[in-house]
Amino acid sequence: MTMKSKHENIAEYILYLWQMEDLVRAFPNDEALQQTEFLGDLLNMMRTEGVMSSGHVQIAQIALGELEDLHADLLDTEATYRAAYMQLLPQLNILKSKSDNPVQSDLSMMFVFLYNIMLLNMQKKPISQPTAALQQQVTQLLRYLSRTYKERLERCDVEPET
């Protein structure tokens, strides 16, 4: 996975940050990692913010928070989006009940779910057909959120952040 800018695709941006956080956690003392500007900066952020063993840096949390706000807005204003979300809700509740953090937001659970699928794919482990179907639904919803996020930024003519 290559890094997308937050402006271009905020969902991929969040997943990429999570992946890089795990890379930094796995090799915190690697000199090559520290010499890479992005990873070196991420390592410093993680140390400063106290998330070397778990959690996410503020830039990832802020991006997720921005999507949470958009998600809430779309639930109130777009019937099609609300219907797609309502179809996912029973499965999200099941996932949350099985997670270490059952009180996390639905959007956060979607990201955790997709991240775990990504890890399984990297390990070349199979996923079941129902899991693949849920992955497709979650991906479609997050793709819509990311596209809407980008469109709203462009309408406001806001300078994209990295």
Image: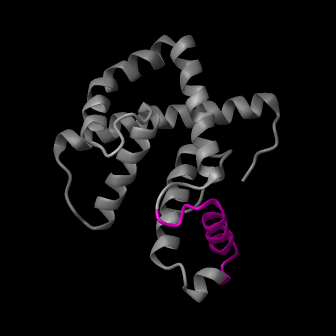
The answer to whether 10 appears left or right of 118 in the picture is right
Report the residue that reaches farthest toward the bottom: 31
**Does 104 sit left or right of 121 as displayed?**
right
Image: magenta residue range: 35-53
Residue 9 visible in the current orientation: no
44 drawn magenta: yes
The image quadrant of residue 129 is: top left
Left or right: 137, with 151 as reference point: left
Q: Is residue 126 above or below residue 95?
A: below
Count of marks overlaid on the render: 0
Dominant secondary structure of the magenta stretch? helix
Residue 117 in view here: yes
- Magenta segment includes 138: no
Res 101 quadrant in image: top left
Residue 25 in picture, x, y percent from top left: 48, 71
Q: Is residue 134 left or right of residue 9?
A: left
- Which residue sits at x=62%, y=71%? 43
Q: Position of residue 3 (x, y in %)?
A: 59, 60
Determine which quarter of the picture holds residue 93: top left
Q: Nearer the viewer, residue 159 or 58?
A: 58
Q: Say which residue appears at 34% left-offset and 53% top-offset.
A: 116
Q: Residue at x 55, y 84 (%)?
A: 29
From the top left corner, tell me how far across and down residue 58 is, in percent: 64, 51
Picture coordinates of residue 30 (x, y %)?
55, 86
Q: Residue at x 70, y 29 (%)?
A: 152
* Rendered image coloring scheme: one colour
